[in-house]
Image (cartoon, rainbow, N blue to C red):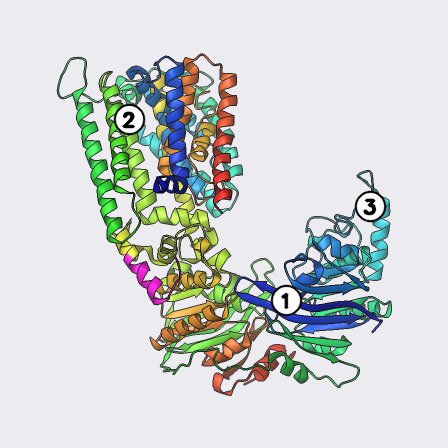
Amino acid sequence: MKTLTTLFRNNIREYGMLIALIVIMLFFQYATDGILMKPVNITNLVLQNSYIIIMALGMLLIIVSGWIDLSVGSVAAFVGAIAAVMMVKWDMHWSITIFVSLIIGAAIGAFQGYWVAYVKIPAFIVTLAGMLIFRGLTLVILQGEAVGPFPTEFQRLSSGFISDFFKVEGFHVTTIVIGVLISVVLFILDLRGRQNQQKYGFEVLPFYLFVAKNVFITFAVMGLCYLMASYKGLPTVMVILSILITLYAFVTSQTTIGRRIYAMGGNEKAARLSGVNTPRLLFGTFVNMGVLAALAGLIVTARLNTATPKAGDGFELDVIAACFIGGASASGGVGKVIGAVVGAFLIGVMNNGMSILGIGIDWQQTIKGLVLLLAVFFDVYNKTKSS
Amino acid sequence: MSDVILEMRNITKTFPGVKALDNVSFSVRQGEIHALVGENGAGKSTLMKVLSGVYPYGTYDGEIYFLGKECRFRDITESEQVGLVIIHQELALIPFLSITENLFLGNEQDKHGIIDWNKSISMTKELLEKVGLKESPNTLITDMGIGKQQLVEIAKALAKEVKLLILDEPTASLNDSDSENLLQLLLQFKAQGISSILISHKLSEVSRVADSITILRDGATVETLDCHKDNITEDRIIRGMVGRDLTHRFPPRESKIGDVIFEIRDWNASHPLHKDRKISNNVNLTVRSGEVVGIAGLIGAGRTELAMSIFGRSYGTNISGQAYKHGQEIDISTIDKAIANGIAYATEDRKAYGLVLIEEIKNNITLTNLKAIADLGVVVNEPKEITVTSQYRDSLNIKCSSILQLALNLSGGNQQKVVLSKWLFSNPDILILDEPTRGIDVGAKYEIYTIINRLASEGKGIILISSELPEILGVCDRIYVMREGRIVGEVPAKEASQEIVMKFIMSQKEVIEQ
């Protein structure tokens, strides 16, 4: 039992928010009389929050670098508007539209990254300007009106589901098969990691906890897949999301680029004097953010089936809050992809649960603000107590 | 002894692992200029921080009496209230506020929180007159030269009704005429009965204006000289500052010196903001393989600036000059290229520039050469990383619970070993070590020297920048002396003594030919 408490105390950052997420989910499950965990609602929850999660991946890198990006909501709206005009007014093919939109996102990221990384203007100012610029340009492009609807193929980006190869009535077997595959891969990776650590004599989880952790993960993955399978199966967005989360978790924790970003955020001068090209790296994180904001913009637009001037309004706040709730540090150098994803889900569950309960937008905002403050207080409190 | 206004008795101050002050006693008489001299790290600043309450009562042992009363200051405000004012080397003025605003900062001439500007300005005019500064009270600090800023600091002290003025290296960054002004001012204060403590490296000034001189060495008082009784020469002071036993502080070494491995020719660089100020002035230096070359000089002599301008132009502007390795000219214009050409620079301030404190030891070590432990140059191979960094932990004897420990939680000596490991991992041929033993204890210093010896015996060329003369003499084969951005002397270690090097450092002559 002693190991369990010390273990929990040492990893309170990582586990704390996960536990908070579970508690909040259980609370809403009870408060909404089971509506929250209904297959259709879970699917909706993922669809509604996919763009927050996608942008949180990019935002996390920027926050770990020690900066912030306030423009992502406006950029998403801007790219969505351009895509709408390209498809609806210029009759361009949806695949070309997606490609061009992502390029535009990269260009916007490069524009903002240039001012931050090379001209050394604080990102807060640059992206505040970007927030105004791209919101304004969205209005210009749409001329104040909504543009839509779009080709079905484009709509599938957000509302499509993967097709089922097994053709069982009322149950999506492919989803279950994918779930099993993911569970097995996750288990093998964890097992190999553990064996590796043991080989170097590092402390590992006690065996019973290792088993418990994997049983829990398997249950979570399979439970989610079961819920999805009993509705329409895995949404396309969920697939995109899983790939992106895996990719970013891998890049941040396993590659030289990830290492350098954390080093830059932890001590920019030390990183630079160690041969890290910090301006170029920072520039790169902004380009990356631009691409992800563009992708989120496309998904939002496809979901609403129209591009509106008000789309993406206030997204930046949810995205930034997700990162901080997930344990990222405002002074840089600290934060994990999984944390940001958990943070984004936490916000998503609260949004969804409170909407089901019929709580107005006024109180929703208030409660979300308090949760953000509480989460960061929890972090700070733990840090001062442990030191 | 009735005219003694300050007496510090048996002051002892310890930091973790280091005894900075050991039973120091120090007294100042009414209306005298008392100079406090000693090498960098001798304990002068620490003693003044104890006196002014920067280190509050209770964090040191010993007693302080000022004007006959025992003082137990809890912070600077309390020491200022009794008339003890310290002016630090780095001036504490707010650049975008006016002279008046700075003079009365925290001491505003107000009624119920509303500032009486007329009163403030007229008081400022009086004070500026006293220090001989002809400036409008509304001039912003940023618009004045450093010499005038120094005078504003002194005026600020006068505004607090100073009885004992403490100046820490006041003339270090002043030119000759500004220095002269300042010294005249001190003499004037003396005539008015205000005592001063003058900390200075410029011994010519000290021997000219001081009434008494106290010499500190290794945290202890060596002696107090009375300038009116004895005939005090600069040589006499230097002897007091350096005379110490050097045996057994440095590991023995047999140098096997090879060919010239690295050479810098006609190196010039300017200050990044003040482009007309040269920080490196026609510097030429060579390093041979297996050789440890020291660069001695005072803080501010331009040693770190030179090293950083060489290392990928990481400091300064308008940099010109050539670098050669094994006789071939090399391009070291960016940090990447410098590292690729086998140059490493371990920074002076390991916390601010050397380490990412919130990261693990292993991540810090591999940062300089991540590709070496990455598959396909991209994916970090953690097992390999662990093996490699464990080797450094063992060979450099880094004391830690695990290489996964955060750099934050290591002692200074072990942090320095991590910095060394990190640069060794970049596989350098030339290592520039900037103050590698600053702030670490004697045992760890010995270990660092042993590592330096081992690297030299492997045929690497080492440049050691240090403000501690015994270290330079004990470790190096050849010594350069820098002053004001120039190399003003070059001495083989065999022929060098602290007196010789100190003369080069202190000499006011422009360039001394070998």
| Quarter of the picture holding the C terminus of chain B | bottom right
Return the chain for callout 2. Answer: A
Residue B113 in percent (x, y) is at: 79, 39
Q: Which of the two discs, 2 and 1, sits closer to the camera?
A: 1
What residue is pinned by disc 3? B109
Closest to the observer, A312 or A138 = A312
* Gap between marks 3 and 2 measured at Cα: 66 Å
Q: Residue at x 85, y 71 (%)?
A: B2
**Within the magenta stretch, is there residue B397?**
yes
Return the chain for callout 1. Answer: B
Region of the chain picked out in magenta, as a range: B387-400
Mark 2 Cα-neighbour bin, 10 Å: few <14, some 14–19, many ≥20: some
Q: Tell me the number on the disc at residue A238.
A: 2
In contact (CB < 8 Å): disc 3 and disc 2: no
**Does label 3 or label 1 sit earlier along the sequence?**
1
Residue lying furthest left in this view? A166
